[in-house]
Image (spheres, rainbow, N blue to C red):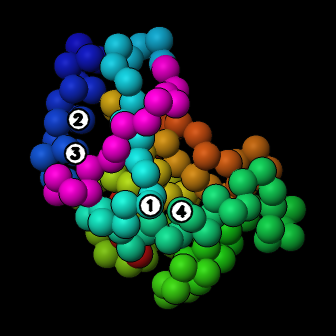
């Protein structure tokens, strides 16, 4: 049943994404024991994604992987995203994760460059991998980190 749901989800995301914006496959895949297929990864150098407006934000955040450039000790995922949005030339965001539920414009679902909002966390999708997403965010293990996450609990998908 999980495989059917994952395949349906992936097909829905692909159908909603223009061909030139679809993620490209790379040799370095993260394998999950419950996924029989290789994950879909995303090359930010293509620049032609449907949600390409968020790709500059991803690049701005990747420059700080493994660190905390905000100087804040607690609850700084929203602050990190705000810094990355400004760096990429977008309107300011908020230091509060939940506030991103009304930022920018709505997205149909997860795709590279889309902001994923949970009640207490926020980040940017870098890839869709089956029924999960790869996301980059601040204050994930007290640093900027990119990792695979579940979409459970997401309250909004937004485009800068």
Of the two numbered discs 4 and 3 on the same chain, state the one appearing first in sequence.
3
Report which residue position mark 4 lands on.
58
Q: Nearer the viewer, mark 1 or mark 4?
A: 1
The quadrant of the picture occupied by the C terminus is: bottom left
Q: Nearer the viewer, mark 1 or mark 2?
A: 1
Q: Are marks 2 and 4 in contact (CB under 8 Å)?
A: no
- Residue 22 magenta: yes
Horizontally, is 143 left or right of 113 in the view?
right
Q: Which mark is residue 13?
A: 3
Residue under the image location 23 percent in, 35 percent down: 9
Specify few, some or many for label 3: CA neighbours under 10 Å numbering under 14, 14-19, or 20 or more. some
- Residue 111 magenta: no
* C-alpha distance separating marks 4 and 3: 20 Å
Specify few, some or many for label 1: CA neighbours under 10 Å numbering under 14, 14-19, or 20 or more. few
Q: Which residues are magenta?
A: 18-31
Q: Is residue 58 visible?
A: yes
Rendering coords of residue 73 (x, y %): 86, 62
Label 1, secondary structure: give it.
loop
Report which residue position mark 2 lands on.
9
Q: Nearer the viewer, mark 1 or mark 3?
A: 1
Report which residue position mark 1 lands on.
45
Of the two numbered discs 2 and 4 on the same chain, state the one appearing first in sequence.
2
Q: Which mark is residue 136?
A: none
């Amino acid at each position: 049943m999980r495989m059917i749901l994952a395949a349906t989800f992936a097909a829905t995301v692909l159908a909603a994404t223009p061909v030139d914006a679809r993620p490209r496959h790379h040799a370095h895949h993260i394998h999950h024991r419950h996924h029989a297929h290789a994950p879909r990864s995303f090359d930010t150098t293509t620049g032609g994604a449907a949600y390409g407006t968020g790709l500059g934000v991803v690049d701005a955040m990747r420059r700080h992987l493994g660190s905390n450039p905000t100087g804040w000790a607690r609850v700084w995922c929203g602050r990190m995203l705000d810094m990355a949005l400004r760096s990429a030339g977008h309107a300011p965001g908020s230091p509060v994760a939940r506030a991103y539920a009304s930022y920018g414009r709505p997205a149909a679902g997860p795709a590279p460059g889309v902001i994923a909002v949970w009640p207490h966390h926020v980040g940017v999708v870098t890839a869709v991998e089956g029924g999960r997403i790869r996301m980059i965010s601040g204050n994930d293990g007290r640093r900027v980190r990119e990792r695979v996450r579940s979409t459970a609990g997401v309250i909004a998908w937004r485009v800068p």
